[in-house]
Amino acid sequence: QGPCSLPSACGCQGRPLRSGRRPPAAPAAMRTGSRHKSNVERAVLNVRAHVQMALDALEGEDLSESVKCCQTQLEEAEKALRGLELRMSRMRSKSHALFEVDPDMSADTRAWLLKTFTDQDSEAAAGNIQLREAMSSMTWSSASSGERARLSAIDLGEVQRALSEDSITQILEGCARPDFDAFALEAHPEAKNHMNTVFASFLLKAKTRLASGLSEDNGWTTSGSAFLQAYITFMTKIDGLYATGALYHSATHAVDCTATTHWLMQSEHIMERTTCLDHFIAVAAAAVHDVGHPGTNNLFHTKTMSDLAIRYNDRSVLENMHIALAFETMKDPDCDWFSLLSRSPAGEGEGASLQVAHLQQYVRKGLIATVLATDMAKHSGQVSELTSVTQEAELANSSGESSPSGLRVGNVLSDDGDRQKALERKMFLLETVLHAADISNPSKPKPIMLGWTLRVLSEFWAQGDKERQLGLEVSPLCDRETGMASVPKGQVGFINFVALPFFTPLASLVSEVQQAREVMLANSEFWKEQDAAQKTFEEIFGPDGVAAQVGAAPVPDTA
């Protein structure tokens, strides 16, 4: 007999092992020479070690203690196997591997193959790396007083008057909190018609890394002041393009999403993995993600074969329209902040021409990917991927490895495949942030949550009314009579089957999200209580809620 070689790992306190049983193999990270093994080999050795320790524990004299130890080790083995599965899945999806088999292949040929036969984007990936490397050596401070003066000098009339109001400023100062109240901002006449412009103007003057990072000397814009002025002018056009007939998908919803996005982008986990330009991409995407929304959903457009559905072949119809409209708006010279982004080479020497750090390409890719990811049809896949990323991060943390779920700013990546994977992770992170903001209504304080619930139901039911007028089958959740009789059940279903399954894994990555998740759980209990008490629509929302249904704005005819 001999003592267990890993008493601290398995909790056996050094009990002797029965004769004939070999001591468990040490985890791969502890084995001499393990640095020469592949990631998969190390993962397999780690699983074997935990299984061996579980088997040894079962032979202990104290059965109750042995069972506990066995359970612990088998749980660790199962976690390691999940990590192995994730790694193997990523290996299978390595798109560039197809073109690495021939060492004599020229760089030009390989680049053509990758651009033509895969979705790899070397320019955007190089832009991402350039930003990461630049960020690692930068220190953030608040925007300079000169930059603030230039921004405040923009002659936008009502917007500047709104920003001069103390009551509006007090509301905007809550933009970095999860309980930001967009309704309170909307209630001010000075801000109501310029919601996104007022919010963006305030945000770009706030003492954050976003304002500091977009200053003139960052090397990412040809002129910091011109960039900021063009962006604010762009926002005035975006405000005008949000349809007044959309009861929920309005400029107010856009500001709410932008504020939640800003809050998430300031979390520790995300700040470690993003640059201030990523922060800008995220809030810009949030501002435009529903621009031009007609108040009817994708299903309505596909059923009616609307012009939009035909143009976008029934795929993410509205989301494609939103981001296309945003870029069309940038064609106006006064709004063209996009062309002021810099283009600079990523390096010199052989192959440098194939590695252009094209910031315009990077920003365009980020905006398109992030807005398209707000298509709710993609939610299930996003939950699965986020859960996998979370499990992988937990495994990496438990094994002491660096997490591949999101490389920190400053990590050096030289391999094309690693750069592409870093870009994909970055895009997924930005997509996750905006999607979380887009479904965050149940995570807001109850009065705000109720306001958003009333608006989204009103828009759904207005669509249902329109479908009846057209002789169409009423879309799910769009039947006014049925919906008004079952509001609590519908909200409990949305929280428990849509929002919580996304916010739960997100909270394990981003600790700040736990606060929002707890509010969401409390709101779920509220709706369960309303359901148990059989509360009517009027009892929940009051006379104003009923009046809103009677005087609801008509849905535009987009069929």
Image (cartoon, grey):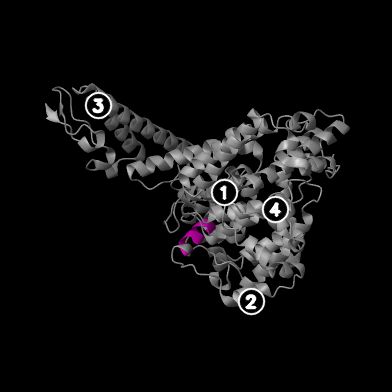
Amino acid at dot 1: Val
Question: How busy is the neighbourhood of tag 1: few (under 14 within 10 Å), some, or many (20 plus)?
Answer: many
Q: Is residue 305 left or right of residue 80?
A: right
Where residue 235 appears, x then y in whole percent?
Answer: 71, 61
- Residue at the spot 13% in from the left edge and 22% down from the top edge: 19
Which numbered dot is residue 183?
Answer: 4
Q: CA distance from mark 3 to mark 4?
A: 57 Å
> Which of marks 2 and 3 precedes in the sequence?
3
> Which of marks 4 and 3 precedes in the sequence?
3
Q: State the extent of the magenta-drawn residues as a range.
A: 127-134
**If the image is split into quadrants, where does the N terminus sit?**
top left
Amino acid at dot 3: Glu
Which residue carries the number 3 mark?
65
Amino acid at dot 2: Ala
Amino acid at dot 4: Phe
Q: Nearer the viewer, residue 77 or 348?
A: 77
- Residue extending furthest left? 1
- Residue at the spot 65% in from the left edge and 30% down from the top edge: 531
Which of the two marks, 4 or 2, is nearer to us in this view? 4
Which residue carries the number 2 mark?
149
